[in-house]
Image: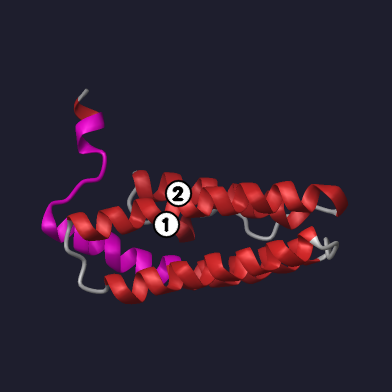
Amino acid sequence: MTVLKWSDEFRIDEGPMDEIHVEFVDCLNVLGAAQGDAALPALDAFIAHTQRHFAEEEAWMAACEFPRVYCHSTQHESVLQVAREVRVRIAGGETTLAPLLAAAVAAWFRDHAATMDTMLAQHMAARGYAPHAEDALA
């Protein structure tokens, strides 16, 4: 089940933020399609990706002194907390929760990308901060 289709509506920076968001949407769709015994591994993969994804954005926020870091990172932690709570329930046999979590996170992501992530990208651009710039030079 596709819970979220990547589209130009989600494009923010044509760079590393978009790349990590494409991966996030892919993981979310795998989670949304997971049934039965596939639910727990799909959720574990989603949580692992999301932890890396959010840590990356939070590193960018620190590097460019993003003023709304607390609000942004609080949203990240809330998503991870819910995912971890759902993991306990899925591990206990409630595998039908995987698509429900995926749909809820998809709805959250639409708003988060349009507001928090867009503000972060604009702030990074205004500060002249380019994540992974050293990799581009190599």
Give whichever of 54, 88 is nearer the camera. Answer: 88
Give the Cα distance between marks 2 and 1.
6 Å
- Compare residues 98 and 113 and report the one nearer the observer: 98
Q: Where in the figure is residue 81, as x and y percent of width and height? A: 55, 69
Q: Is residue 91 above or below residue 76?
A: above
Q: Are marks 2 and 1 in contact (CB under 8 Å)?
A: yes
Q: Is residue 15 left or right of residue 100?
A: left
The percent coordinates of residue 135 (x first, y second) are 25, 30
Region of the chain picked out in magenta, as a range: 113-135
Residue 43 quadrant: bottom right
- How many C-alpha atoms fall within 10 Å of the one at disc 1: few (<14), some, or many (≥20)? some
Q: Which mark is residue 138?
A: none
Give the image quarter of residue 3.
Answer: bottom right
Which residue occupies the extreme bottom position in the image?
Answer: 71
The amino acid type, in three-letter code, at marker 2 is Arg
Residue at the spot of label 1:
54
- Secondary structure of the residue carrying numbered label 1: helix
Magenta stretch holds residue 130: yes
Magenta stretch: dominant SS? Answer: helix
Coordinates of residue 56 in the picture (x, y in percent):
36, 50
The quadrant in which the N terminus is found is: bottom right
Query: Label 1 amino acid?
Result: Phe
Q: Is residue 1 visible?
A: no
Above or below: residue 127 compared with residue 79: above
- The residue positioned 53% from the left and 45% from the top of the image is 23
Residue at the disc numbered 2: 52
Q: Secondary structure at mark 2?
A: helix
